[in-house]
Amino acid sequence: MSRRILQPGEIEALDHHTSFPRVLPPQVGSLFTERAARLRQLAADNPIADYLEFAAHIANAQHLAAQALAAPAVDRSTMERAQTHGMPLFPAAELLDTQLQDWQQALEHILDTLSTQTESRLPEALQPLIAELRQLPGQERDTIARQLLGKDLAARYIGMAPFVMAALQVRFAQLAATLTEADMPQAEPATVCPVCASEPVASVIRIGGKASGHRYLHCGCCATEWHMVRVKCSHCASTKGINYQAIEGDQGVVQAETCAACGSYRKIVNQEKDPLAEPLADDLASLMLDLLMSETRFQRASANPLLYVAVAEEQPEQAAEGADALIDPLAPAAPSSSSH
């Protein structure tokens, strides 16, 4: 019997005839709690442990907000138009003016949790920053949200960015969770989320159920996941020059998938290596891989939505300097001697 190797186009064609899900809507009931637990697990012995603990506090506050607020209503007419034209259903920036005008309710809930609840309360050094955000007019908060979604954030808002993005994630995830796979169009380009048109933060090889063994792109905004074959670049969809970089001696849970065609990389998280791996959390925790990749010609394809985070030392004299206690996790730093 003769055999031949399937080409990328033929592999993709086969995908339409198999039984695994094409799209995985987020499970809001467990999304943020699982993310918080993973962040805390990854914080152990991590050089950016404070940062991961900060992100875990935010994820916990997101869960409480998602449980307290009803999901946004879905505009079926908008969905039908998008499905007809093969476009993402609800482009994020456009939705702020229509169906998600109430996104600031999620923000208020998150800020309440981070400033009052014992388990999730942030250090005192960051409380002035939260207070400043709470006092901003709604119109200015909308400005921050639009700048975040447009990836053009003014420097004066950097300290507030993770809180605003957290609220947007809650509302977009709630909206996406009301959809089914049948609602999702075969959107173009296939490298952006079919729900909110945002970029993936990472990709993930899933385990369990029909999705087991398949690679999905994970939206950094609404947490929807959509299938893409592994032979394709998740940024430019090229099938040429795809390679994987990892830290020597690492378990391989997180690798950098590089593309020679566009010169980009995006991390791929493998649940077959660690069943508890979570795309956004593991991307945040693998800073050393980003630092090592900064020494190569490859550029990161998209940022983590919680990229700018507050790292505070609990010292009274810093209480008025919450906005200055911020770092960029991808700022130049001396990497370890490990190779990739």
Image: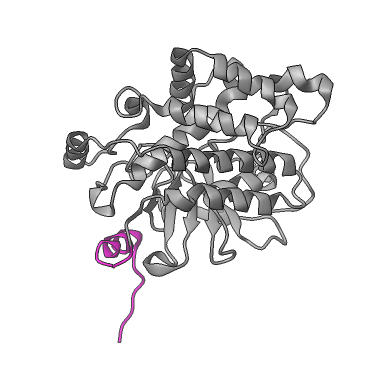
Can residue 241 be seen here? The reply is no
Residue drawn at x 83%, y 26% as measured from the top left: 315
Tell me the magenta residue range: 1-20
Percent of width and height locating residue 178: 31, 46
Left of 121 or right of it: where is 263?
left
Q: On the rendered structure, is 198 left or right of 9?
A: right
| Extreme-bottom residue of the structure | 1
Say whether residue 312 is left or right of residue 71.
right
Relative image position of residue 88 (x, y in whole percent): 29, 39
> Closest to the observer: 216 or 26?
26
- Tell me which residue sits at (28%, 43%) in the image: 187
Which quarter of the image is occupied by the N terminus? Answer: bottom left
Q: Is residue 2 magenta?
A: yes
Residue 157 screen position, x and y as percent: 58, 19
Q: Position of residue 151 (x, y in %)?
A: 48, 26
Kindly indicate the quadrant of the structure image that contains residue 71: top left
Asked if 212 appears above or below 312 in the picture, the reply is below
**Dominant secondary structure of the magenta stretch?**
loop
Is 219 in front, or is 118?
A: 118
| Magenta region includes residue 207 | no
